[in-house]
Image: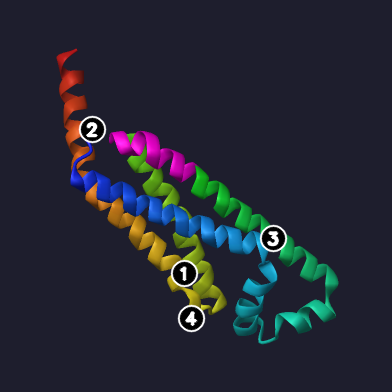
Amino acid sequence: MKNDRRQIVAIILMLIHDVMLAFWGFLLWIIPDQVLSVSSQSFLQRSWISIKLSDSRMTEFVTHYMRFWGLEGLLMAAIITVLTLQPYRKGELWSWISIGICSSIGWIAAIVLDIQLGLLSIIYIDVVPLIVAYSSLAVSGNAILRNLKKLKGNLAAL
């Protein structure tokens, strides 16, 4: 696919999404205590410090879990970045679908978790990247559909 303006905007939007995902994953991986200090207060009605002082095994488990979640975010950002820079840039349908499914599953799961934990004050952290990803997919959808029509035409010719 030639890189027209819409496709360049779509690629830039998706790279912004990837940076947001990587940043969130980095925060969870490197400083889970600071993230937990914000979220534990609203859900558990206790400060993270009091939880750390009262239950060291639970603290260790939750900290490792948050670090794992952060590492998952970093890896997902790397995968989506590779998809963005190669097949998505070329307008390949499978990359468009893969990015849409991965972004939906990851961010909607995080939004549901935020709602269940009562973390409505930080839900925007999950909603904004999802909107950016969907915007990128919408902008590039026209080019993807053109490629799909070409593919159907080539398959019909066989």
Q: Quadrant of residue 62?
A: bottom right
Q: Which mark is residue 125?
A: 1
Does residue 67 appear anywhere in the picture? Answer: yes
Mark sitting earlier along the chain (3/1)? 3
The residue stretch that appears in magenta: 79-92
Residue in the foreground of this view, choosing between 68 and 30: 30
Direction from residue 66 to residue 58 in the image, left or right: right
Looking at the picture, how far across and down is residue 81, in whole percent?
44, 44
Mark sitting earlier along the chain (2/4)? 2
Looking at the picture, how far across and down is residue 90, in whole percent?
30, 33
Q: Which residue is mark 3?
A: 65
Label 4 sits on a secondary structure element that is helix
Front position among marks 3 and 2: 2
Label 3 sits on a secondary structure element that is helix
Kind of residue sitting beneath label 4: Ser
Q: Which mark is residue 1?
A: 2
Front position among marks 3 and 1: 1
Whole-angstrom CA distance, mark 2 to mark 4, is: 41 Å
Residue in the foreground of this view, choosing between 30 and 71: 30
Q: Are marks 2 and 4 in contact (CB under 8 Å)?
A: no
Mark sitting earlier along the chain (2/1)? 2
Label 1 sits on a secondary structure element that is helix
Direction from residue 28 to residue 148 in the image, left or right: left
Residue in the foreground of this view, choosing between 112 and 20: 20
**Does the magenta-highlighted stretch encompass residue 102?**
no
Looking at the picture, how far across and down is residue 31, in whole percent?
67, 66
Q: Residue at x 19, y 12 (%)?
A: 158
Whole-angstrom CA distance, mark 4 to mark 3, is: 22 Å
Q: Which residue is mark 4?
A: 121
